[in-house]
Amino acid sequence: MPTTFVNPVVNPAANLGVSLFDETDPVYLWESASEADIEIVIRAVYRQILGNAHIMESERLAVPESQLRQREFTVREFVRQVAKSELYRSRFFDPCSRYRAIELNFKHLLGRAPHHFEEMRHHSAILDQAGFAADIDSYIDSDEYQTAFGENIVPYCRGYKTQAGQPMLEFTNMLQLLGGACSSDKDLTSGNKARLTRALILNRAYGIEPSRSGNDILSEVFGSGAQPSTTLPFSQPSSGAEYALQQKYQEQATLVAALQSQLAELRPFASMGSAIIRQDQFAGDTSIAPLTSSGIRVAPAGSTLQRQVEEQEALIASLQEQLAEARSLAAIGEARLNKWRRRTFF
């Protein structure tokens, strides 16, 4: 029996788990559409807007469906009715954290992940100022929706494809939101917390370290040019004791670099946590201080290797103290970002 070999290099969609999305044509409601064609459109809207979740016959929106069949609605207006329905709200808004709901709105209504954190802030502000329905309208009435789908194309996942002018971060984030063609956004096992907040704030795919030198990280963390030297002050050890000191110095240098990298990653969230705490303090209270490099000393060139080791011990202790504080503040910041939505929207 003959078989067909598919080269994975020329078939990346299969490797990424998006081949079904890649091979499925957009669903369009034609003027000459039959009753069967309209039913296909309706089911495609439910599948996309409700995140591939199962919908029972009793949950279907009978009146909006009838209006679409009678051509009183365009597909765009039917999408609006589904997205504003209690069915959608009860699944993807009420039980979700603020930014998780916004992530899903981008995926369901625009077919992509957020480009950057400012988009999340923008829609969060709409929720605060105008409520749930107005936020749904802001996606469907946008120029982007009109350009991508028009009046009669069912929205579809499109963010997994690289495009001119599209940031690569949105591409990787969309793959994280997709979860495969058989997954459902109503999967309660994965929880309702935001998936992309950290990646958007850091402006890079979370878990992927950027190509930066240790000096760059130090400059970002401490805001100064003072950095501990990782070059040994002596080329060859003259004794076993000196060799042991050099080994300890190198181990310390590795630990210092790791601690500094962790501090750099926590800094955006720690800053948020610090700002939240300051809001709860009395006016003029300065008990919460920002992370700084105060008290950290770097051994001057020409000092003994023993002195270098001692200086690095002090540096490590200070970094560990700052890291503990940063983790505490970052936990507060992330908790606020993932806070549960208060039931005050209309």
Image (spheres, grey):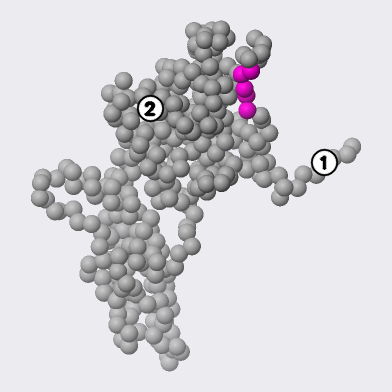
Indicate which disc residue 217 carries.
Answer: none
In the picture of the structure, the residue carrying the numbered disc 1 is: 4
Find residue 247 and report its image quarter: bottom left
Mark 2 to mark 1: distance in Å? 48 Å
Work out whether residue 272 can be spotted: yes
User: Residue at position x 40%, y 51% from top?
Assistant: 202
Q: Amino acid at mark 2?
A: Asp
Q: Residue at x 77, y 44 (%)?
A: 6
Task: Give the vertical position of 48 relative to 289 (above or below).
Answer: above
Q: Name the element at disc 1.
A: loop
Residue depth check, mark 2 versus mark 1: number of the one nearer the observer: 2
Q: Quadrant of residue 5?
A: top right
For image coordinates 46% across by 20% down, the residue present is: 80
Give the magenta part as a residue range: 26-30
Front residue of 60 and 193: 60
For residue 328, say whether it is visible: no
The quadrant where residue 267 appears: bottom left
User: In what quadrant of the picture does the C terminus appear?
Assistant: top left
Q: Earlier in the sequence, mark 2 or mark 1?
A: 1
Spot occupied by residue 52 in the image (x, y as percentages of width and height): 55, 26
Look at mark 2 in the image and give the residue it sits on.
135
In the image, 124 versus 242, the foreground residue is 124
175 falls in the magenta region: no
